[in-house]
Image (spheres, rainbow, N blue to C red):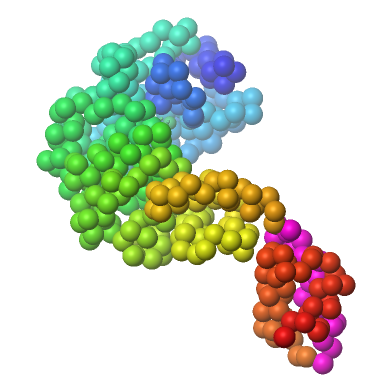
């Protein structure tokens, strides 16, 4: 893998300056599992200042926590100094970090043993918590006592559930028990951090198991909106099939809870993109599946919509959606053969106003529904003579 080779050259660069450095975190885990690797994180004994002297292009993105971003041959690598952490009083960041020179001490602050393996440039592993056997057993085991580690940063419970979804692993017995007993610790965590994990959970292969786990552990009791609708997580766990995105989950939850998408967006502090996608999905789920409905749905939501139809209405509409999509005479309003300017010139006596938008929309709909061809002359005729009748 090219990206690994580059990361190893970055590590070599650091070593040439007399420091230690390793690949750490999700990349090592995913590599050992044989999964596609996401971002590559490097940990080093060099302090941020020392790392900055090794490379030309360095962006200090979290220097107080020891992290800098290095640009190396058009790739970015996060390089973090080996550190131990103090308490998490604000439940966002540790109160203090201490830079250390021992990689094992750095691995000890990590959440699960599968995430606490370091890989040297030679491929040799530093694995003090036996993450490899956890990978073999497909188990998520906390580094140290689950009670202590979850108390320190309750987000780790949510991360555990999202790894269940992504990796298809089981939570080890103790971690699972503490999650049940201490589920309300999660309410101390800023919702933005929970949303990020929920988003990753939704795109995992084992969403059903993960949602079931949120239900069975009661973690939902610490989540906005879910906590006000005690039946919701249960209904979700019963219905859910593979999902793709958080927008799909929000759309489904909105329908099952009859709480508008906007409530979810506000209380879960979701992005505008998720808001719009979820609103589109809810709208089409509530309408008849016709040309106009499919036309209004952004094409990137087709798959998600089909998944939701299966979950929500137990219908398989995939072929239907793709044939309707395929037959659409236009893909968006810019492909319409006439514009607002045309309308103004055809009705010189009318004052400019909202009629232009309304009429254009009526034309667009008629074209999409194949009531009239997308041809300027014919549209003009229809607009001037046929529209009102
Ligand atoms: P992904 O593949 O989604 O990036 P990841 O395991 O790399 O998964 P990150 O959030 O990128 O997750 O974190 C990188 C590493 O930092 C983790 O593998 C873990 O070792 C450590 N880590 C991240 N968040 C925490 C946390 N809340 N508590 C302890 N360790 C953490
Ligand atoms: Mg990562």
Can residue 89 be seen from the camera position used here?
A: no
Residue 347 is drawn in which quadrant?
A: bottom right
From the top left corner, tell me how far across and down residue 102 is, in percent: 32, 17
Q: Residue lying furthest bottom in this view?
A: 349
From the top left corner, tell me how far across and down residue 97 is, in percent: 30, 33
Q: Residue lying furthest left in this view?
A: 181
Name the residue at 49% across, 57% down: 281
Q: Work out whether residue 321 or residue 61 is closer to the camera in this orientation and state it.
A: 321
Task: Residue 334: say if magenta.
Answer: yes
Q: Work out whether residue 152 or residue 327 is closer to the camera in this orientation and state it.
A: 327
Q: Is residue 366 left or right of residue 225?
A: right
Q: Work out whether residue 322 or residue 46 is closer to the camera in this orientation and state it.
A: 322
Name the residue at 82% across, 92% down: 349
Q: Work out whether residue 114 or residue 149 is closer to the camera in this orientation and state it.
A: 114
Q: Which residues are magenta?
A: 329-349
Q: Is residue 296 left or right of residue 133?
A: right
Can residue 137 be seen from the camera position used here?
A: yes
Q: Quadrant of ligand 1?
A: top left
């Amino acid at each position: 893998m090219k990206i690994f080779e580059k990361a190893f050259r970055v590590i070599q660069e650091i070593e040439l300056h007399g420091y230690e450095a390793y690949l750490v975190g999700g990349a090592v885990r995913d590599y050992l599992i044989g999964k596609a690797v996401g971002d590559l994180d490097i940990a080093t004994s060099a302090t941020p200042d020392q790392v900055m002297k090794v490379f030309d292009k360095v962006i200090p993105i979290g220097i107080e926590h020891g992290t800098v971003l290095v640009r190396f041959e058009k790739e970015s690598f996060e390089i973090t100094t080996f550190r131990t952490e103090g308490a998490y009083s604000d439940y966002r960041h540790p109160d203090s970090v201490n830079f250390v020179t021992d990689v094992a001490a750095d691995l000890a602050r990590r959440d699960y043993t599968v995430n606490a393996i370091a890989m040297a440039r030679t491929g040799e592993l530093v694995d003090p918590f036996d993450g490899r056997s956890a990978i073999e057993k497909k188990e998520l085991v906390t580094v140290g006592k689950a009670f202590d580690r979850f108390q320190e940063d309750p987000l780790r419970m949510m991360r555990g559930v999202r790894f269940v979804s992504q990796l298809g692993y089981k939570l080890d017995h103790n971690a699972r028990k503490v999650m049940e007993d201490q589920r309300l610790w999660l309410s101390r965590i800023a919702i933005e951090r929970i949303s990020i994990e929920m988003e990753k959970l939704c795109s995992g292969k084992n969403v059903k198991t993960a949602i079931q786990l949120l239900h069975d552990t009661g973690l939902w009791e610490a989540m906005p909106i879910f906590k006000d609708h005690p039946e919701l997580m249960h209904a979700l766990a019963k219905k859910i099939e593979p999902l793709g995105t958080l927008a799909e989950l929000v759309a489904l939850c909105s329908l099952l809870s009859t709480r508008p998408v906007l409530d979810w967006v506000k209380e879960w502090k979701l992005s505008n993109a998720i808001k719009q996608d979820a609103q589109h999905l809810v709208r089409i789920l509530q309408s008849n599946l016709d040309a106009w409905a499919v036309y209004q749905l952004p094409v990137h939501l087709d798959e998600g919509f089909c998944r939701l139809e299966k979950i929500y209405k137990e219908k398989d509409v995939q072929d239907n959606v793709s044939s309707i999509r395929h037959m659409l005479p236009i893909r968006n309003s810019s492909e319409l053969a006439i514009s607002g300017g045309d309308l103004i010139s055809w009705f010189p006596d009318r004052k400019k106003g909202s009629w232009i938008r309304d009429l254009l929309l009526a034309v667009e709909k008629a074209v999409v529904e194949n009531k009239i061809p997308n041809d300027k002359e014919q549209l003009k005729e229809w607009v001037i003579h046929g529209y009102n009748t």
